[in-house]
Image: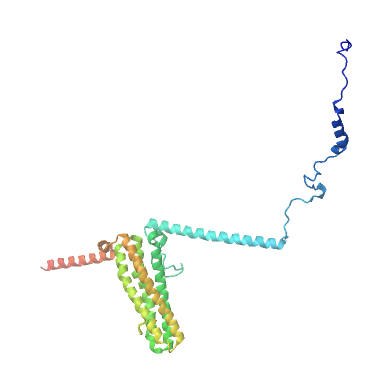
Amino acid sequence: MSGYDSNPFADPVDVNPFQDDSITKATSGSAGNIGEFNPFTGTEMGRTVPISAASSEPAILHTSVEQNPQASSAAGQANLIRQQEELERKAAELERKEQEMQNRSRASNTGVKENNWPPLPNFSPVKPCFYQDFEEEIPEEYRRICRRMYYLWMFHSATLFLNVLACLAYFTADAAYAVDFGLSILWFILFTPVSFVCWYRPVYKAFRSDSSFSFFFFFFVFFFQVVVYIIQAIGIPRWGNSGWIASISVLRSNLPVAVVMMVVAGFFTVNAVLAIILLKMVHSKYRRTGASFSKAQQEFSQEVMTNRAVQTVAADAASSAAQGVFGRSREN
């Protein structure tokens, strides 16, 4: 019965759960170490660098070379000069474009374009005789071949000028060849403008307006120009051409003069070869344009009928014929 006499409301036996042996050993053996543990000093986290050891300099990029005030002022002055030159160049370009626009507007208003070839200065008493603009007048399909014909004409003129110098050397080597020197001057003065008017301008007009008559006129004249190139390259003596025959004939007597003449003979040969190639190229372009001989006849008749000079001559002839008829009727 003693068991039933115990007071159920009495305090139970005090049991401390932290007095367990395992807990006591853990707290007694490593309590000091746990208190002093620094997770940032361990070898597993890597070695730390104290803040005092770090550089206290700010993160600023310092220039390795200090600029001298004189050097900086010179650089600034050079920059200003360069900007001024750029502005002047742009101003000149704008002025040129404005002048071109004014010329085009003036030409569109009057219906007549101002001539610009040959490009002569404004103070020259001789004014340009032709208007030429590949970008404006020539279609893109024919622009390249038209420029090549223009370059051929310039090369042709330069060759004729060099022919004058070669014939001069020929004349100095032997006074008997004075006639070649005189004829070379005549060919240069005559053939330079005649070639421009007779075969370059017709092909330019042909590509510009797709003119069958201009094509036929160009083919007719340029064929003879190719023949002339071949004759000039051959170099028949007393004909005023420094060709191969003339240069070889003076080879033994005067070597430097012969070399100069051979160079010009080579230029004449290049002219002949380029002329044949360009003639074929122009003919291929001509076949694509749809030009024909009947169209050329129609264009020629229209050109003749609308020409003011022809109209004036026809009117004068008609008036003179009418006056003759009236005079005869009065006499009768």
Residue placed furthest toward the front: 1
At a point 12% along the width and 69% down the height, the residue shown is 331
Residue 135 versus residue 10 in the image, above or below: below
Say above or below: 254 vs 43: below
For residue 233, side relative to residue 296 (left or right): right
Residue in front for this viewpoint, 59 or 107: 59
Res. 273 visible in picture: yes
The answer to whether residue 329 is above or below residue 176 is: above
Rendered image quadrant of residue 147: bottom left
Report x, y in % for residue 264: 42, 79
Q: Position of residue 221 (x, y in %)?
A: 31, 71
Residue 143: x and y in percent read 40, 62
Tell me how many marks there are: 0
79 in relation to 256, above or below: above
The residue at the point 32 percent across, 63 percent down is 286
Q: In which quarter of the image is the C terminus?
A: bottom left
